[in-house]
Image (cartoon, rainbow, N blue to C red):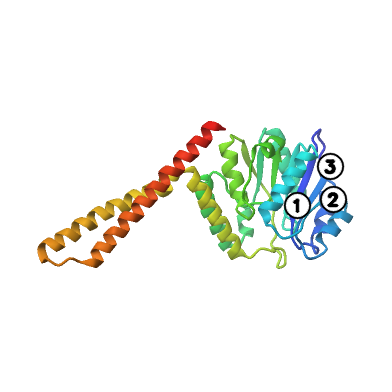
Amino acid sequence: MVAMSLKVAALLPAYNEEHHIASVLVCLRRYVDLMIVCDDGSTDLTGDIAQAMGAIVIRHDSNLGYGAAVKSLFKAALEHNVDVSVTIDADNQHDPSDLLRLVEALRENDYDLVIGSRFIEGNHNKVPGWRKKGIDLINRLSTNGGVSDSQSGFRAYSRRALESLELTEDGMGVSTEILIKAEEAGLRVGEVPISVRYLEDSSTYNPLVHGLDVALSTFKHMSLRHPLLFFGLPGLISLMISVFMWAFTFRNYTLSKVFSTGLAVTSLTTTLVGLSLLTTGVIIWVMVSIRKETV
């Protein structure tokens, strides 16, 4: 148990982790006051094993996704008046003793969120190259490179953080959503190095599906934060192209007296696309601005 006057809980999203969850919980219980497991529609004995190990178990009737599990765990942590909540994967990739680093960093630096990073102090050598490149791209898009490991599931949260974050993502994109909304809420975010191990049977998520889910979620949230950049700018560029296309179309007709249907269709298409994107950007910007003023 963590030697401090804080009530600390380990939160574990779990889906078909009967081979790993017992060993993870055995190691975790010496560091925390409470262990809460969300059995996200597992078809094996994950939930039963977790309950036998002394964890509080939340059960989803079907597999709703990582984000849905995280939301259920956050709600449970608040209901149990937890001071510090630490999410950790149930697949034995993380070292439970690293939990102490996260909690200490949160307490000593007055952070609201501490991320266990796989990419600082040399840990990147243990991470597959393709995975690191993908995470680097997402880091740049979602945090402007301010966080080295935006997709780490090993994180410590203050109670204030859990109360401030209103999450909507049910899939893997929740990791990015949390960072974006933490910044908007003015939460203080830090990172500490952690160790990680990749086992052949540790991940229950298809890396392709995982990557696509995160990418789409990142794009969605970033487009809502900067609608004029994501929609308005491409719309303006498309309209500028359409002006040149229309000019070329009429010039061609003036010189040859032959009306080019292909050029006209292309000009019309770029005009409609530009107007649609520009209008979308402005509408979203107005709606987001109104929402911010009314909150």
At 73% across and 60% down in the image, what residue appears? 62
Crowding at dot 1, Cα within 10 Å, few <14 / some 14-19 / many 20+, comes out as: many
Residue 207 vs residue 218, the one in the foreground: 218
What amino acid type should be assigned to the residue bearing mark 1?
Leu
At 14% across and 63% down in the image, what residue appears? 253
Residue beneath disc 3: 33
Q: Is residue 140 visible?
A: no
Horizontal side of 140 relative to 259 (left or right) equals: right
The N terminus - image quarter: top right
User: In which image quadrant can residue 295 be found?
Assistant: top right
Residue beneath disc 1: 12
Q: Secondary structure at mark 1?
A: strand
At 50% across and 49% down in the image, what residue appears? 141
Which circle, 3 or 2, is nearer the viewer?
2
Spatial distance from mark 3 to mark 1, Cα to Cα? 14 Å
Mark before the other along the chain sequence, 3 or 1: 1
What amino acid type should be assigned to the residue bearing mark 2?
Ala
